[in-house]
Amino acid sequence: MSSAVETTDHNTIKKWAESRGGFPAQVKGTDGLLRIDFGEPEENLKRISWEDFFAKFDESRIKFLYSPEKDSKFNKFVRN
């Protein structure tokens, strides 16, 4: 298993998510707690546009931690 990678690059995040069937989302009832929605049953997620996602991402000053392994969906948002 390879190590997780951190990034703040919008194109890298979008490409990683879309290549795994993911969509930008936020947790319902929050001011912008971000997640990647892989279509698995999670009633607390609301899909949002990539534009809104990255506006909240930049405003929150967070990093995206992810596994570069092809079949891995591991990801996490961490404080910068």
Image (tube, grey):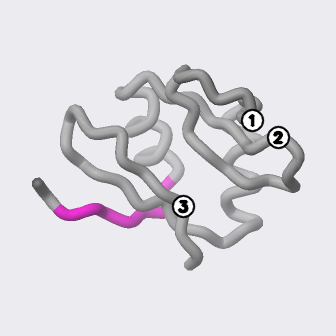
- Mark nearer the viewer, 1 or 3: 1
The region drawn magenta spans 3-9
Q: Secondary structure at mark 1?
A: loop
Indicate left or right for 33 with 72 as reference.
right
Q: Are marks 3 and 2 in contact (CB under 8 Å)?
A: no
Q: Amino acid at mark 2?
A: Lys
5 inside magenta stretch = yes
Circle 3 is placed at which residue position? 77
Q: Nearer the viewer, residue 28 or 2?
A: 28
Q: Quadrant of residue 27?
A: top right
- Picture residue at 67% right of the left edge, 58% below the top: 57
**Looking at this view, is 75 or 8 the one in front?**
75
Badge 1 amino acid: Asn
The mark nearer the N terminus, 1 or 2, is 2
Residue under label 1: 44
Above or below residue 64? Residue 80 is below
**Label 1 to label 3: alpha-carbon separation:** 17 Å
